[in-house]
Image (cartoon, rainbow, N blue to C red):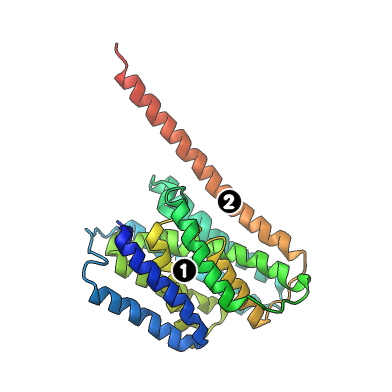
Amino acid sequence: MNALLAPRRRIIWVTWLIAALLFLAIGNGLIYGLTIPLTAGLLVLLAPGLVPNAGRHVDGQDIGAVLLLYVGVVGALYLAFQVFTVDRTLGLFLCYAAGLILGVVGPVIYTVWMRGRPLADLGLTTKNWRQAVGLGLVLGLIQFFLTLYGYDLPAPVDWVPLLTMSLMVGLFEAIFFRGFVQTRLSASFGTIPGVVAAAALYALYHVGYGMGMREMAFLFGLGLVYGIAYACVNNVLVLWPVLIPLGSFYNNLQSGGFELPWAAIAGFVDVMGIMFAAIWIAHRRERRAVKSTAAETSNTAAPV
């Protein structure tokens, strides 16, 4: 399904990814949001076959699940940040946590229980883990030196909770937008429409945070970078726990809009615990299914 896995194509896209992250140094979100899709589009046009068309079959059930979960996630975040706001922290946190949990547990249940697909379909796999970790570290280091290197961090109480939150949000975004939304849209419409649509949905979901069009234009470009990085290896390790959390952490530091107590760390860890628990339970189900299939095959093949 994924057209970017061939080694020669991967080298070209990795080079583009490095250049795209280095371009963050321009410091203008609108220009970034316009330039990144333009250069990616030109690369596809000027290098025929770089992303060859694969066979497509629109899966209505997949599209419905993507839309339903997307609306649920965005709705929960909108309630958190636009309705409850920081003035009512309990409601804010509960809605925020519910949205992020829905964005991970929902795809896991849909993929493994409802469709009988493996967790690998969500990028939760050991396949290509070396390439994923290697690429993630390279891209993460570039982002670190452009944003956080030499950054004058505030007191630990002001940044440690933010880092924990960034890890939580990064896990959600990697699984939901790349492992689920992008994968399912690519399966139905092709790699290019899938990556572009997932990047657009990623940018638009920030309306729940109260962001404007200028910020979302930048996030569309950044979403393309994340989406292409994921498409190179089909493994969430390319995005988490380094690349996306680093970007989120820097953005939170820059915005200065979050003042979180130490106790908030426990809440973020609890949310990640629920996410990992759902993944672990699904993994156990997979293993039992494999063993059951192996046993049935063995019994069928055994001489009477």
Query: Judging from the image, what secondary structure is the residue with disc 2 in?
Result: helix
Under mark 2, the amino acid is Phe
Residue at image location 41% in from the left, 46% down from the top: 118
Residue at image location 34% in from the left, 26% down from the top: 297
Query: Judging from the image, what secondary structure is the residue with disc 1 in?
Result: helix
Dividing the image into 4 quarters, which one contains the N terminus? bottom left
- Which residue is disc 1 drawn over? 71
Mark 1 vs mark 2: in front: 2
Q: From the viewer's side, name the closer residue of 21 and 175.
A: 21
Q: From the viewer's side, name the closer residue of 137 and 214.
A: 137
Say left or right for 98 vs 236: right
Is residue 123 among what the camera can see?
no
Residue sitting at the far top: 304
Under mark 1, the amino acid is Val
The quadrant holding residue 95 is bottom right
Q: Position of residue 133 (x, y in %)?
A: 50, 57
Mark carried by residue 295:
none
Q: From the viewer's side, name the closer residue of 2 and 118.
A: 2
Is residue 33 among what the camera can see?
yes
Q: Where is residue 202 in the image (x, y as percent from the top left)?
A: 46, 72
Residue at image location 46% in from the left, 49% down from the top: 125
Image vertical order of residue 289 relative to residue 110, above or below: above
Image vertical order of residue 239 relative to residue 208, above or below: above
- Real-space Cα separation, disc 1 to disc 2, in angstroms: 23 Å
Q: Where is residue 35 in the image (x, y as percent from the top left)?
A: 39, 84
- Which residue is disc 2 drawn over? 276
Image vertical order of residue 247 relative to residue 291, above or below: below
> Of label 1 and label 2, which has the lower sequence position?
1
Classify 10 Å Cα crowding around label 2: few (below 14), some (14-19), many (20 and above): some
Say left or right for 145 vs 121: right
Classify 10 Å Cα crowding around label 1: few (below 14), some (14-19), many (20 and above): some
Q: Position of residue 99 (x, y in %)?
A: 56, 65
